[in-house]
Structure formats: C-alpha cells, structure tokens
Image: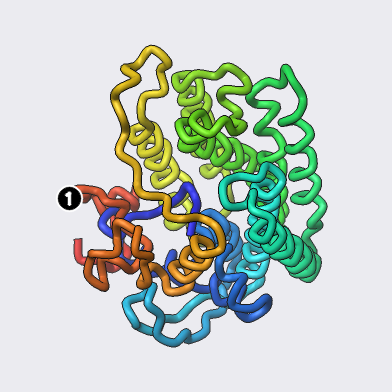
C-alpha cells in the first residue's frame, strides 16, 4: 500500500478510523471482484479519498457489505463500502499504478531493467491500464483525463528548462478530474469547482512529496527527480507544499457535505501531517554535507524475479509474510502485519483533534 495520507489509529477517533477502514477495504475488495486478486496490489491510501468524497456528498450513506476475516483487520470481519465511489477509486488506482510501473520499465529502474522482469511488468501495466479504463467508463469517468496526463508528464520530463509547477501540472490535472467526478456521482454540481481545486492541489502535494522522499535515492542512482531537474531546494518545495495545504483547507470549507468529519480529518489534518512527516524524515541532501556520514538503509534484497515475488507475497498477505532480508521479519505476527495506522509514532495522541468542533464520534476519548 502506498500514498501520502496515512492516518494513525492513535491520532484518529475510533469512529472515523472505522469509516476510513470501510472505504479502504471496500476499494481492495472492489479491485479483487472486478479485476482479480493481482489487482489488489494497487490498493492505496490516496485512491480511497475518492470513495470518501462520494459518500460525504451523498444524502444517503454508501451501501455496505459484510466482508470475511482479513489479516489487515486482525482476522476480523467488517462492513465495507460497496458503491460507485469505490469503483471510481479502483479505476483511478489501476490507471495511475499502471503508469508508475510503465515509467519504471521505460527507465529500466532496478529490477525493471532485467528483460524478463521488465517484460512481465510491462504486460501487467498494460492489463491494469485497460482494466482501469473499463471501470472508469462504467462510472461515467473519461479515462483520457488520466492517460493523457501520464503522456504529458513523460514529454515534460524530457523537455529542458521546464519549471517545477509545470512538471506537477499533469498530476494536478489528473487528480483534479477524478475529484471533480465525485460531485457528478453524488449529484452535487455546486461542489465541482472546489473539488477541482482540491484535486489540483492534492496532486501537486503528491508529486512534490514523492520527489522529496525519493531525492536521496534518485541522486545516488542518477535517476530523474523534478527537484534537481528544476534546481528547486527543499525550502522552496516546502513553501509550495504549505501554500497547497492552505488552498486545500479553504476549498474544503466551501464544500457542501452531508458528512464532513472524515473529509476534514483526511484532507486537512492528515494531509498536513504528511507534509510535516515527509520533510522531517528527509535526510540532508546538501552537497556540502560530510560525505563520510552515511544514512542507514534497509537491505533492498536481491531484486529480480525473487524480489518481485517476495514483494507481491508481502502485499497479498498484508505484511504477514516478510522476506528473509526484511527488517520486519523478526517481529511478531501483529508487528509484521502491515495494518494501516501508526507510522511508527512515539506515543502519539490528540485523537480528538480530528474533530475540530468537538468529538462526537462515539470514541472513548
């Protein structure tokens, strides 16, 4: 699972966290039911925001279905979302994941540079792109808004002299289109403009935070990074992120919502924490820094088909299986399980901060 919005179970009221999990599991099961078990690999935290937005704008709550026990939920069953919002989230996740894998194959990054792995990954990416396009069309969403943005991104990255915000523009356009379509599914045309703005700024944040997180590795391997390509330092990147956070907060306040709390918890509180977390954990990339000072890194493993197979096994078992080189392998069952929630925070609290107007979610805080 991946994404920039990763709520911590210790920092979100139990009622809201349960709602969030219902959307997360609903996305995962929608991918499985419509596109097979392998498609569950593209389940991500950010994609489910689309599902959350559809339900938040709708007069009636999204339909639920009972899901059987799952490792992600500690071998417990749950009522999960089964609605058009989950299908839109699935289509967006598939198309964007296909683009990301395709980009790795084109750049021959790591194990993707090996002929057999590259060919297999390319086939999977093409399959995901077709599947995502079919589901998007089924919910009335034009997949060209996403596929066109992917093609435009590739062209911009090969064009010299492009500014940073020009590079983030395709991602902004893709997310903006997806968020705006939630207003169509929910029958809230008045929300379309603010949702387009929220999507545009969310896309900018996703692109910038990804660039910041990858900066050290990209420099070490010589891969393309938008910050280096445009000569942007971390202070400037942080300023762009803070401006985007302010814009998101203002646009969220304009939305006409039936259920506001989870939207605000994700797009205001958690999104802000994602920015803080990313810049706080980014090591110094100052060229003048001590070259002998090393940052500890996790063993990347052998790569190749073995690495890809083990990564897929870890994902499909929600983290219960860990490869021999994985630092999480020695932990107990619950420690290995990649349950959404705490990102390693130390004694985090402030649960009721997720309810700006006071907590009435039924939690025990």
Against 342, residue 209 (above or below) is above
Closer to us: 46 or 32: 32
Q: Residue furthest top?
A: 288
Query: Which quadrant of the structure image shows residue 216?
Result: top left
Q: Residue furthest left?
A: 347
**Location of residue 232 in the rendering, given as x and y in whole percent from the top left corner:** 55, 19
Can residue 342 be seen?
Answer: yes
Can residue 183 be seen?
Answer: no
Residue 206 left/right relative to 132: left
The total number of labels drawn is 1
| Pointer 1 residue | 347
Closer to us: 348 or 249: 348
Residue 327 left/right relative to 217: left
Q: Residue at x 78, y 65 (%)?
A: 130
Q: Residue at x 37, y 77 (%)?
A: 71
For the C terminus, give its image quadrant: bottom left
**Location of residue 281 in the rendering, given as x and y in whole percent from the top left corner:** 34, 36
Give the structural element (helix, strand or loop) at label 1.
loop
Model colouring? rainbow
Residue 243 left/right relative to 76: right
Against 145, residue 215 (above or below) is above
**Location of residue 148 in the rendering, given as x and y in whole percent from the top left corner:** 81, 46
Query: Which quadrant of the structure image shows residue 334?
Result: bottom left
Circle 1 Cα neighbour tier, 10 Å, few/some/many (<14 / 14–19 / ≥20): few
Against 341, residue 170 (above or below) is above
Q: Residue at x 53, y 75 (%)?
A: 81
**Location of residue 364 in the rendering, given as x and y in whole percent from the top left corner:** 20, 66
Closer to us: 113 or 218: 113
Q: Residue at x 46, y 25 (%)?
A: 238
């Amino acid at each position: 699972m991946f994404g920039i919005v990763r709520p911590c179970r210790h920092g979100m009221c139990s009622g809201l966290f349960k709602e969030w999990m219902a959307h997360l599991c609903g996305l995962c099961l929608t991918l499985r039911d419509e596109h097979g078990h392998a498609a569950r690999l593209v389940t991500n935290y950010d994609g489910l925001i689309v599902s959350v937005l559809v339900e938040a704008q709708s007069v009636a709550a999204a339909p639920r279905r009972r899901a059987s026990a799952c490792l992600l939920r500690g071998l417990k069953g749950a009522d999960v979302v089964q609605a058009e919002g989950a299908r839109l989230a699935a289509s967006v996740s598939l198309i964007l994941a296909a683009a990301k894998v395709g980009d790795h194959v084109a750049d021959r990054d790591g194990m993707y540079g090996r002929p057999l792995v590259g060919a297999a990954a390319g086939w999977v990416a093409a399959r995901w792109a077709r599947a995502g396009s079919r589901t998007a069309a089924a919910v009335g969403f034009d997949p060209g808004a996403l596929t066109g943005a992917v093609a435009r991104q590739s062209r911009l990255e090969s064009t010299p002299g492009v500014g940073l915000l020009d590079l983030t523009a395709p991602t902004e356009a893709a997310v903006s289109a997806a968020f705006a379509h939630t207003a169509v599914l929910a029958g809230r045309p008045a929300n379309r403009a603010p949702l387009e703005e929220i999507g545009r700024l969310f896309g900018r944040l996703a692109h910038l935070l990804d660039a910041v997180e990858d900066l050290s590795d990209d420099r070490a391997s010589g891969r393309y990074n938008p910050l280096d390509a445009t000569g942007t330092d971390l202070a400037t990147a942080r300023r762009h992120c803070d401006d985007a956070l302010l814009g998101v907060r203002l646009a969220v306040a304009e939305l006409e919502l039936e259920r506001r709390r989870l939207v605000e918890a994700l797009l205001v509180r958690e999104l802000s924490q994602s920015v803080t977390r990313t810049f706080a954990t980014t090591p110094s990339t100052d060229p003048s820094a001590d070259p002998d000072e090393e940052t500890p890194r996790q063993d990347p493993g052998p790569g190749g088909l073995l690495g890809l197979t083990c990564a897929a096994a870890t994902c499909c078992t929600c983290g219960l299986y860990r490869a021999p080189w994985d630092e999480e392998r020695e932990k107990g069952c619950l420690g290995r399980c990649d349950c959404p929630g705490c990102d390693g925070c130390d004694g985090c609290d402030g649960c009721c901060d997720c309810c700006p107007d006071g907590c009435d979610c039924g939690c025990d805080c």
